[in-house]
Image: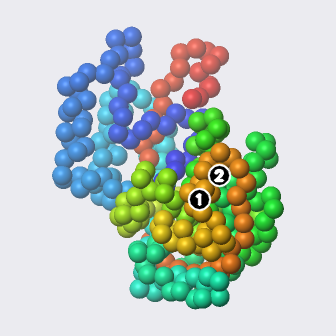
Amino acid sequence: MIRLRLFPVILLLSTFVFAAPPGPEAAIKSDELRSHMLFLSDDLLEGRATATRGHEIATRYVAAQYSGMGLKPAGDNGTYFQTVHLRQAILQTDKSSFSLEINGKSEPQKLEDDWYAGGSYLRNDSQFEGEVVFVGMGISAPELKHDDYANVDVKGKIVAIMAGAPEAWETTTRAYYSSGYLKGKFAAEHGAIGMISLWTPDFDPHYPWAAFLRNSKFPAFNVIDRNGKPKDSYEQICGSVAVPVAKSKQLLSSAGLDIDEVVKKATAGEYVSKALPARAQIHLVTEHKDASSPNVVAMLPGSDPKLKDEYV
């Protein structure tokens, strides 16, 4: 996922949303907006994908428009451009594998039918194994009196996690605690070494397994920080895989858990975590491709002498 690096003293303007020129008569006119979109959506820009020539052309077009509006450049070295360093992680499917040992019986898993992974932004080759512990929705939020890690030991183990957050929580709180980044953070803080994302019957209709497979094969990037480390990644976590509903059912039923009942309880905020009689072996081989791509950054100074040095 690409994240914007926000400077504390600038206003970032979205690459493809145009502000009206400063002034009391400012307005967005449909004909002008249409002309911008005709250019930006032209096939010659090749979809404007991140770190491609088409995207570079688009950013220069946007910067030119901002300059024409009288907006001040707020990017690197007095320009409209902010360089973002990125890494693409490409799973080498022919070299990667996932297997499960359930109740003492080892079962190799078939790529796409039984599992998939997006590759690791941290490691080119990661091979690890461990006992599997189901941790519900994988949320540790003492301030909300909720901790899926309360009565299970996951140190050196692989956690199996469901999507989402309890329904009773306020909408923005649910969205925050549903993030994969935060669930990875909780897993790492509790000592887990890997993650298995469980597709469930309630989640699959919203994001079908087939859609996940399709999207996982598109190029995806992560931001690389000033120290050369990918954002929102944890050294503690060696890797993660996802499994479809049928495999989730098999894993939970191995410990006598009914997936529909588990989903119902977890959604209601009840504690459902439990160690499973399962062990996973995961081997992920990833090709890294580093690149850079610009944000377009401009600034419209305020007129109030006291507030003009504050930024949104």
Would you identify the image quadrant in which residue 145 lies? Answer: top right
Q: Neighbour class for label 1 at 10 Å: few (<14), some, many (≥20)?
A: many
Which of disc 1 and disc 2 is earlier in sequence?
1
Amino acid bearing label 2? Ala
In the shown orientation, is residue 100 left or right of residue 90? right
For label 1, the residue is 162
Relative height, residue 140 to residue 102 (above, below):
above
Say which of 121 and 193 sits in front. Answer: 193
Say which of 286 and 298 sits in front. Answer: 286
Could you say where residue 246 lies in the image, as x and y percent from the top left?
Answer: 48, 69
Relative height, residue 241 to residue 46 (above, below):
below
Q: Neighbour class for label 2 at 10 Å: few (<14), some, many (≥20)?
A: many
For label 2, the residue is 266
Amino acid bearing label 1? Met
Is mark 2 in CB contact (under 8 Å) with mark 1?
yes
Q: In this orientation, does residue 129 appear? A: no
In the shown orientation, is residue 151 left or right of residue 219? right
Could you say where residue 170 lies in the image, as x and y percent from the top left?
Answer: 63, 35
